[in-house]
Amino acid sequence: MAMQNYPAPGGILMQDNRVYTAQPVIVSMPDQNVNDDIIFSTFNLHFCNPCCLGFGAFYNSIKARDSRLLGDFPMARSYGARARRINIAAIVIGSISILIFIIVLVKSMSRLTSSYYHL
């Protein structure tokens, strides 16, 4: 009666009856956390786009995402930071423009109604 070779605990029996044990593999990955602000850029592209700043922010967000997928993390971080700065500028300029428009509208409506009642 032939005895079969059984692998040692934690080992793998190969075809030539040798036993291999698994060795841990440690892979160091670079920091892949890249913030591309794509949602913020999409919002600014559609709703708050003074002087085409929303388009510029959206473009840089797409470039950051593409660079991250290609593995060029320093360029991806650069595009992401630029997109964030342009997004902040777009939201500030857009908010100030909307506020000025509302103030001018209220002032003109108050002058119109005051001139109407003085007739």
Image: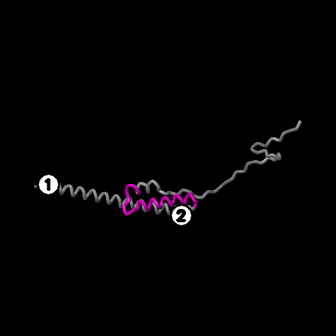
Classify mark 2: helix, strand or loop. helix
**Residue at (12% x, 53% y) in the render:** 117
Label 2 or label 1, whichever comes before in sequence order: 2
What percent of the width, then of the height, locates residue 3?
86, 38
Image quarter (top left, top right, bottom left or bottom right) of the C terminus? bottom left
Would you identify the image quadrant in which residue 56 lies? bottom left
Would you identify the image quadrant in which residue 71 lies? bottom right
**Residue range corresponding to the magenta coloring:** 45-71
- The answer to whether residue 40 is magenta is no
What percent of the width, then of the height, locates residue 34?
52, 57
Image quarter (top left, top right, bottom left or bottom right) of the N terminus? top right
**Residue at (34% x, 58% y) in the render:** 95
Classify mark 1: helix, strand or loop. helix
Q: Residues within 10 Å of mark 1 (few under 14, many from 20)?
A: few
Give the residue at mark 2.
Answer: 75
Give the residue at mark 1.
Answer: 116
Dominant secondary structure (helix, strand or loop) of the stretch shown in magenta: helix
